Amino acid sequence: MSLTATIEFQGKKYEFPVTEGTEGEMGIDIKTLRGASGLVTLDPGYKNTGSCESAITFLDGEKGILRYRGYSIEELAEHADFLEVAYLLIFGELPNKEQLEKFDADIKAESHVDEEMKKILDGFPKSAHPMGVLSSLTSALIAFNPSAVDVSSEEKMYTSIVRILAKFPVLVAWAMRKKMGLPLDYGDDSLGYVENIHKMMFKRPNQEYKRNPLVIEALDKLLILHADHEQNCSTSTVRIVGSSHAGLFASLSAGISALWGPLHGGANQAVLEMLEAIQEDGGDTKKYMAKAKDKNDPFRLMGFGHRVYKNFDPRARIIKKSADEVLGDLGIDDPILDIAKGLEKEALEDKYFVDRKLYPNVDFYSGIIYRALGIPVEMFTVMFALGRLPGWIAQWREMRLKKEPIGRPRQIYTGENHRSFKKINER
Ligand code: SDX
């Protein structure tokens, strides 16, 4: 029996079909609303509005569930590696051995970035934020890969996908090395995907690269945990830019800019800066809790709260556990971790946070691990983008293959009614 919903307005009833997802989520399909009633909906921030049907990632914010293509984030973080998860998100199934080996080889074959790109990087001052550099370099890649993705050809779509999966880590490493005053290097195809990224980021010109499996494992897990998160701000940006049939690289560049914001992916950098400020302030967490609750103070407890999760962010649980393991394995005693745990305990017992269902999110503990891995704080959100890349690609591909219409929301106009022009001497 097909589900419907009825809206009654000015004495007239309008019936709409209700779409039910495979996990029981329901959405009123209002495609005909304006034509039938003259009404539009109003929902700033799209808190109640679904933009699409998607088969990639499922979230249950009340239960704290996150699954990529049906597999739980806990199992993937425990048993998979990042390249497998990238393949799963983009193509819908975990790869078998041959498929994974081919994927890896195809990516390696595309890992060269045109030397001319270094001239663009040279144009940035060292003080430039790496997210701005990365967004620009990603867009600049179009100039060296001009043919827009022919989405009607699975083969051409595949080539574009492996191309950006191969070149993006090089751009990430170059953005970091520019900031650190290190020469710009290329990858080492003899290494695994994540280890190659780590080597490109950290290899010193005058030293042998020291392989540390614990560090690579921790980085791989962090990238998996950031790989997709359904219709978040940056993914919705990638989708809406791609819906105009702008290319994949241009859409990704826009997504990077959206992720940069401190309310979104930029929160991981803001969390570390907040924790360092608390540490400098003698560890006075109560002062910062009071600031976070003061409506006259713009300060927010960064790393807390989430649009969807009204329970623990499952990724935060995994990252918190991993932070203890990584710092323990590396023999690092970072007081910032203790401050974070103290802040979390206080917030989880505080009425303001409990009433608003504000829990630690993915960004609350991730920076502590990045710092332990020697990643500069301004690179934290770049690491988020590196992890989110396969998710953005998967969502862009799904949107284009489904031939979704161009995204163009409506509005309610609240400005001046019609008025006639006045000459300047009449104003
Ligand atoms: C990410 O969407 C995704 O999936 C994102 C992400 C992904 O993987 O892509 O999960 C990654 O972006 C995680 C979020 C990282 N951002 C932060 O940690 C920044 C701090 N958090 C907030 O700014 C906020 O919680 C948001 C932006 C995350 C969510 O904001 P909402 O859903 O718009 O909620 P809201 O701003 O309307 O807040 C509801 C209430 C308000 O109080 P009242 O007006 O009801 O009295 O909760 C308060 C807010 O003031 N509140 C906070 C708070 N977060 C919300 N108060 C203090 N500190 C906070 N962190």
Image (cartoon, rainbow, N blue to C red):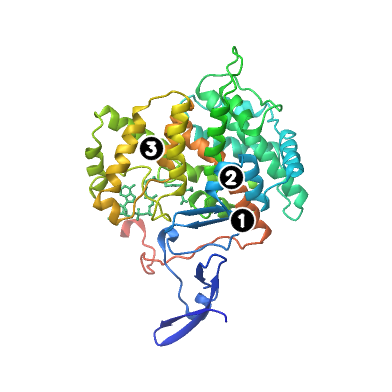
Precedes in sequence: disc 3 or disc 2? 2
Q: Which label number is shown at residue 252?
A: 2
Specify the quadrant of the image occupied by residue 97.
top right
Within 10 angstroms of label 1, few (less than 14), some, or many (20 or more) residues? some
- All told, the count of numbered labels is 3
Q: Identify the residue under disc 3.
A: 270
The answer to which of 260 and 358 lies nearer the viewer is: 358
Comparing labels 2 and 1, the label whose residue is closer to the camera:
2
Q: Is mark 3 within 8 Å of ligand 1?
A: yes
> The C terminus appears in which quarter of the rendering?
bottom left
Q: Identify the residue under disc 1.
A: 244
Within 10 angstroms of label 3, few (less than 14), some, or many (20 or more) residues? many
CA–CA distance between discs 3 and 2? Answer: 23 Å
Q: Does the image show residue 247? A: no
- Callout 2 amino acid: Leu
Precedes in sequence: disc 2 or disc 1? 1
Do tag 3 and tag 1 residues touch (Cβ < 8 Å)?
no
Q: Which label number is shown at residue 223?
A: none
Q: Position of residue 244 (x, y in %)?
A: 61, 56
Classify residue 296 as left or right of residue 39. left
The answer to which of 316 and 47 lies nearer the viewer is: 316
CA–CA distance between discs 3 and 1? Answer: 33 Å
CA–CA distance between discs 2 and 1? Answer: 13 Å
> What residue is shown at x 53% (from left), y 79% (from top)?
3
**Secondary structure at numbered mark 2:** helix
- Callout 1 amino acid: Ser
